[in-house]
Image (cartoon, grey):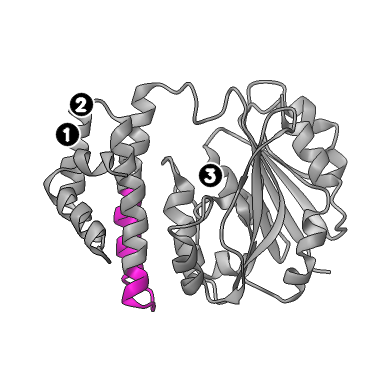
């Protein structure tokens, strides 16, 4: 049985961390290590974690953000496989057990399913996506990039540690949307990839969710961080030995995500953001395969706000 390293970054997670840890320690999979990175919490997170200190690998550090905490976890992991869990989420007790056949096959990336749940555990929505047997990561990306709700999400995969280390993959520090900036590149480098119908991750929709109640300046920064990730991704994929069609899929996927961000900006910032999009000629990344799409493509060239109203 191969070892799985489960990495849990925790920042001011006193309300949720015990539920997360209990779900991980209850796994019906013996060969695992649990790595908790306390990222400079100022509440009672450490006190809650201390109850489990003999069952986990505990790392305490100054606050550096989610990316830095995950990178520390990767560095300290000793398992053949790595899994990420956010401290306010939790997993089903048989998740790793159900994934074991794919672990035994030595697959680079193993995708499972998640569901949105309330804080009380009531299901809100199954977050769906395509299911397929083992293929190359390049093909997997093209299958998922326009149909999967969670393709770019770090916590929806088991990764072979060698895949991350060999390619020197790290989450970008100091930027929002770190998953967007890294996971597509990881998928493209996977030699073997499987997308399963196993659902075992519970994505908790809490009142203090990172996507709620944030100030406008943070919303604006998130939008501009997407542009930074985009610039890196389009530069990186030119080094990859992948088909031109796949490169186009990557550019289109990124562009769609960025275009949607314009709706979150106020009038003046939206104008400037659209200028940044046009400067990169990103509208040319949207392809047209039929007359209806061609019309949308023409509208996109004329007016991005008008295009977004058609979506």
- Residue 245 occupies which quadrant of the picture? bottom left
Residue 246 is inside the magenta segment: yes
Badge 1 marks a residue whose secondary structure is helix
Check the picture and name the quadrant holding the N terminus: bottom right
Q: What residue is drawn where x is 84% and y is 37%?
A: 52
**Along the horizontal axis of the image, is 103 left or right of 191?**
right
Q: Position of residue 109 (x, y in %)?
A: 61, 66
Q: Give the labeled residue for mark 1.
A: 271
Q: Nearer the viewer, mark 3 or mark 2?
A: 2
Badge 3 marks a residue whose secondary structure is helix
Between 285 and 9, the one nearer to me in the picture: 285
| Residue farthest to the left, as pictured | 302
Q: Which residues are magenta?
A: 228-247
Q: Earlier in the sequence, mark 1 or mark 3?
A: 3
Q: Give the labeled residue for mark 3.
A: 68
Distance from the alpha carbon under mark 3 to that under mark 2: 34 Å
- Residue 87 occupies which quadrant of the picture? top right
**Along the horizontal axis of the image, is 24 left or right of 134?**
right
Distance from the alpha carbon under mark 1 to that under mark 3: 33 Å
Q: Nearer the viewer, mark 1 or mark 3?
A: 1
Q: Earlier in the sequence, mark 3 or mark 2?
A: 3
Q: What residue is drawn where x is 49% and y is 53%?
A: 152
Q: What residue is drawn where x is 38% and y is 28%?
A: 218
Q: Give the labeled residue for mark 2.
A: 267
Whether residues under marks 2 and 1 lie with C-beta atoms below 8 angstroms apart, the answer is yes
Q: What residue is drawn where x is 25% and y is 58%?
A: 293
- The local crowd at label 3, few if under 14, some if 14 to 19, many if 20 or more residues have their Cα within 10 Å, is many
Q: Position of residue 4 (x, y in %)?
A: 75, 60
Q: Is residue 145 above or below residue 222?
A: below
Distance from the alpha carbon under mark 2 to that under mark 1: 6 Å
């Amino acid at each position: 049985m191969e070892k799985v390293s489960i990495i849990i970054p925790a920042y001011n997670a006193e309300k949720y961390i015990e539920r997360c840890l209990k779900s991980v320690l209850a796994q019906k999979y013996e060969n695992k290590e649990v790595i908790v990175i306390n990222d400079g919490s100022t509440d009672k997170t450490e006190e809650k974690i201390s109850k489990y200190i003999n069952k986990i690998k505990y790392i305490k550090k100054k606050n550096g953000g989610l990316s830095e905490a995950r990178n520390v976890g990767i560095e300290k992991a000793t398992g053949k496989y790595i899994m990420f869990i956010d401290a306010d989420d939790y997993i089903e007790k048989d998740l790793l057990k159900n994934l074991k056949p794919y672990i035994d096959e030595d697959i680079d990336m193993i995708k499972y399913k998640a569901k949105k749940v309330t804080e009380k555990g009531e299901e809100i929505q199954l977050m769906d996506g395509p299911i397929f047997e083992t293929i190359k990561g390049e093909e997997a990306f093209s299958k998922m990039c326009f149909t999967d709700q969670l393709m770019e999400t770090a916590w929806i995969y088991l990764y072979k540690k060698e895949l991350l280390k060999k390619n020197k993959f790290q989450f970008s520090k100091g930027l929002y949307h770190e998953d967007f900036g890294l996971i597509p590149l990881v998928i493209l480098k996977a030699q073997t990839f499987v997308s399963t119908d196993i659902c075992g991750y519970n994505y908790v929709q809490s009142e203090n969710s990172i996507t709620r109640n944030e100030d406008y300046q943070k919303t604006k920064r998130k939008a501009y961080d997407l542009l930074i990730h985009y610039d890196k991704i389009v530069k990186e994929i030119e080094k990859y030995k992948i088909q031109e069609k796949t490169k186009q899929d990557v550019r289109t996927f990124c562009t769609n995500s960025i275009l949607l961000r314009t709706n979150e900006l106020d009038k003046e910032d939206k104008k400037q953001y659209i200028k940044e999009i046009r400067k990169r000629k990103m509208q040319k990344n949207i392809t047209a395969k039929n007359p209806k799409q061609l019309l949308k493509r023409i509208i996109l060239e004329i007016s991005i706000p008008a295009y977004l109203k058609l979506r």
